Image (cartoon, grey):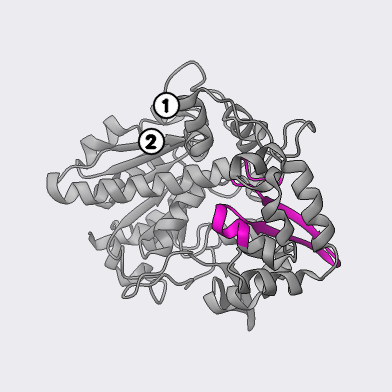
Amino acid sequence: MNDIATDPAIAKGPAASSALAGTVVLDLTRVRSGPTCVRQLADWGAEVIKIEMPEGLDAGDPMGGPRQGPDFQNLHRNKQGMTLNLKDKDGLALFRRLVEKADVVVENFRPDVKDRLGINYAELEKINPRIILASISGFGQDGPYANRPGFDQIAQGMGGLMSITGLPGQGPVRVGIPIADLCAGIFASQGILVALLEREKSGRGQWVSTSLLEAQLFMLDFQAARWLMAGEVPKQAGNNHPTSIPTGVFPTSDGHINIAASGQRIWERAAEALGRKDWLENPDYASGQARSKNRDRLNDEIAKVTATRTSAEWVEALNGAGVPCGPIYSIDQAFADPQVRHLGIARELPRDGQPVRYVGQPVRLSRTPSQVVSHPPAIGEHTDAVLQKLGLDAPAIAELRSRQVI
């Protein structure tokens, strides 16, 4: 905790949460994985200072979309913003002064960039032994691919995910969200929180690092374990669950539903709810092993039944019988669902008299909940206030701005 966090000159109104109050984070990130990491900290009340290049020097953040677009806005809420040219010696000197008072620095440059700038962990630790540096890269901080540019879809492919996604025989398919980026960011934030906890005992910071590739491999979870422990190479299963049968997508008279009839007892309930008790006497479907062997034929028979009623009718009937079943929504339908509305994950914050909706945190804390309290900062919005806290007066700040140091 330090005085940057509590300085009223850079206060931004109500805190997002009190959980990380007093924790100062210097955000050097761009695009998605790094901003995802920092968003986690900002949403739980950390004082985040987003550092960008001065206007006119910045090449832009094309993968984040336009600054006023939904993608950028959702990634950078609850943050303050300043401009600082780290390639200028005076800009770098100011950054080092910020590090003296900060708790965390987050970056997702290619690994060699921070060495060239002189802001790697070895250098930051000299300035502030309590500093935590979090680094996110495409493939790791060292090794044969360390300096390759990282990109979510590349990690999805190299991490094996695309080989198990999609319908059998159609070729590899990417997931519909940048899952490697998002998971790397979330794992990095988890690593930061662990390092902050450990610092309470040791009094020392440390270097936290992850990569898109590592995050993607970790997210393979049981599919990775099938290979590592049993020597099985998983393949595409489409909408069918690879091991729980019948679990998959089935047509209805007005769309599609998911049914997850895993385990013998739930299978028995499903057969009864679908009006086909005779399936329970059929030796081809009598056991999980038999249903796996005859999966395609069983799925076809289930589809003929489900196609006779609407999705809503089947969702009610099957859930009423204790069989997991749910609709398959478009995204607008998902946010209109009564349970989703009850959970309140779409958070509103007014801007110019109009509500702006953000995706809120999916975790609830009973005493220190997370809120969306501020829109993303305009570029350099808090530069003057941050530098005034470091002791710079208005003429000094104006001189730095004239040289595009800020």
> Is residue 40 at least partly visible in the picture?
yes
Question: Residue 107 in the image: x percent, y percent?
Answer: 44, 41
Residue 65 within the magenta-colored segment of the rendering: no
Q: Relative to the observer, which residue lies in front, 219 or 398? A: 219
Q: Residues within 10 Å of mark 2 (few under 14, many from 20)?
A: many
Residue topped by disc 1: 141
Say left or right for 19 vs 405.
Answer: left
Q: Is residue 349 above or below residue 106?
A: below
Q: Relative to the observer, which residue lies in front, 16 or 378? A: 16
Question: Residue 230 in the image: x percent, y percent?
Answer: 48, 26
Q: Secondary structure at mark 1?
A: loop
Quarter of the image holding residue 125? top left
Q: Relative to the observer, which residue lies in front, 347 or 352? A: 347
Give the extent of the magenta segment: 239-268
Q: Amino acid at mark 1?
A: Gln
Residue topped by disc 2: 209
Q: Amino acid at mark 2?
A: Ser
Q: Earlier in the sequence, mark 1 or mark 2?
A: 1
Quarter of the image holding residue 349? bottom right
Residue name at image x 60 percent, y 39 percent: 289
Say left or right for 125 vs 82.
Answer: left
Q: Is residue 167 above or below residue 248?
A: above
Question: Residue 273 in the image: x percent, y percent?
Answer: 69, 67
Q: Relative to the observer, which residue lies in front, 133 or 213? A: 213
